[in-house]
Image (spheres, rainbow, N blue to C red):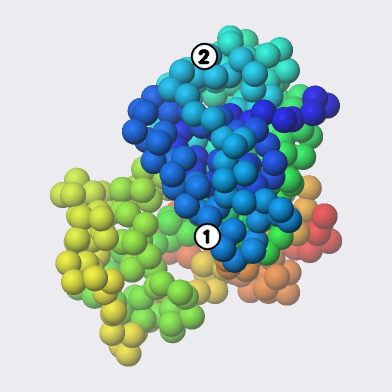
Amino acid sequence: MVEIKNLLVLGTGLMGNGIGQVALMAGYNVTLVDIVEEALNKAAADIEGGLKKLEAKGKLGEGETAASVMTKCAKSTDLASAVKNADIVIEAVIEKLSVKKDVCKTTMNNGPAHVIFASNTSTMSITEIGKDCGAPERVCGMHFFNPVPLMSCIEVIKSADTSDDTFNTAMDVAKKLPCLRGKRYIAPVLKDRPGFIVNRVNAPVGIYRSYITDYAYENGIPWEQIDADTGGIMPMPPYVLADYVGLDTSYHAANYYAETLHPDFTPGKVTTRMVKEGKLGRKTGQGYYDWSKGRPEPDMSKKAGLLDLELIMAIRLNEGCRLIEEGVVTGWKVIDDANMAGMNTPGPFGAGKNNWEKYTKKLEEFVEKSGREYLKPCELMRTGKFVNMKK
């Protein structure tokens, strides 16, 4: 493996800035690249501000100051020039396949013969991103969770073309990036499948939520009564959370899964209409709730009796079993660990290994009632064979 010394971060949004900060803290020479100079200057200032806060708390390395760490930070608006000395490029540009393919090709055309291109995409195929770059064996995924310095999970993804050397090097780099809240957790993703691990395990819950949402609307049931069904055990109940994240975000993700996994992921009627009307939640002031006066506080005293939390666990368990069947992981421990590290919530297997028979029955009953065929229990779940596939 080539020793990685020079790390280039492409794109200086929230994710790029976070990646840049932890890479500097790990001791890498970091070059920030963006096509907008003002964005570059703001990124460098934000990173330095974050480092100064850590310095004040004594959380930088011994003898290190924010100023000394920043001496290893360079900026450029020209990827073709900046990549000439890069050992690895981590891209965090806009989620458009054509843009990612272009910057991947520019990296391979202008970088050293050993340069690795790692995409931070949360949805797109790493195989597709690297397909036409000339060196797909040096392309992989490094999917970070936001905010990068605080969220410990990084998924490292092996595409259909990624070499073992590239994958192992990316794993090594990921392990060296510090996390300010607990230990960094690296989840190896052995096969390039939609959603990788964490997003994929949770994605099919959207099929159930769409069904519930459309049913509630047709029957005049208020969203807050469905939120009340959770019993307050979640940091944000489902419809508050959907508004907070943005209905457009979940809408586009659902359409992506509908194209790549199964039509059952297609967004429901209510969500589709709200997105078309521009009612996207917190960012527009109106979604399922009115956000004009700040975060809504729904009345949790009256329940709809619609949302079945055990069914949600069953859906996630089934999808986790699918990941094992597809060869994305070799066992379920990495799924549970990655979900906790990436979402701060337990994965499905802790409860699932003792309740799979009950969960299987719940899924079969829901599929019969709703017609959502994708949620049929897969073989590993239906037979319970996953229980002995921990690693």
- Of residues 285 and 15, the one nearer the viewer is 15
Residue at the limit of the structure toward the bottom, as seen here = 301
- Of residues 96 and 229, the one nearer the viewer is 96
Measured from the top left, where is residue 33 in percent x and y?
48, 28
Is residue 3 left or right of 8 when viewed as pictured? right
At a point 34% along the width and 75% down the height, the residue shown is: 226
Measured from the top left, where is residue 169 in percent x and y?
76, 33
Closer to the camera: disc 2 or disc 1?
1
Mark 2: amino acid: Ala
- Dot 1: few (<14), some (14–19), or many (≥20) neighbours within 10 Å? few
Q: Quadrant of residue 104?
A: top right
Instruction: Check the image and report above or below for 147 versus 135.
Output: below
Is residue 383 left or right of 120 when viewed as pictured? right
State the mark number for residue 4.
Answer: none
- Of residues 26 and 164, the one nearer the viewer is 26
Residue at numbered disc 1: 53
The answer to whether marks 2 and 1 mark residues whose Cβ atoms lie closer than 8 Å is: no
Is residue 28 left or right of 93 when viewed as pictured? right
Instruction: Check the image and report above or below for 77 versus 346.
Output: above
Q: Quadrant of residue 12?
A: top left
Residue at numbered disc 2: 80
At a point 59% along the width and 37% down the height, the residue shown is: 71
Asked whether residue 62 is in view, the answer is: yes
Measured from the top left, where is residue 75 in percent x and y?
49, 29
Measured from the top left, where is residue 190 in percent x and y?
72, 39
- Dot 2: few (<14), some (14–19), or many (≥20) neighbours within 10 Å? some
Instruction: Check the image and report above or below for 284 versus 25.
Output: below
Asked whether residue 323 is in view, the answer is: no
- Of residues 310 and 32, the one nearer the viewer is 32
Q: Quadrant of residue 77?
A: top left
Callout 1: SS: helix
C-alpha separation, residue under disc 2 versus residue under disc 1: 33 Å
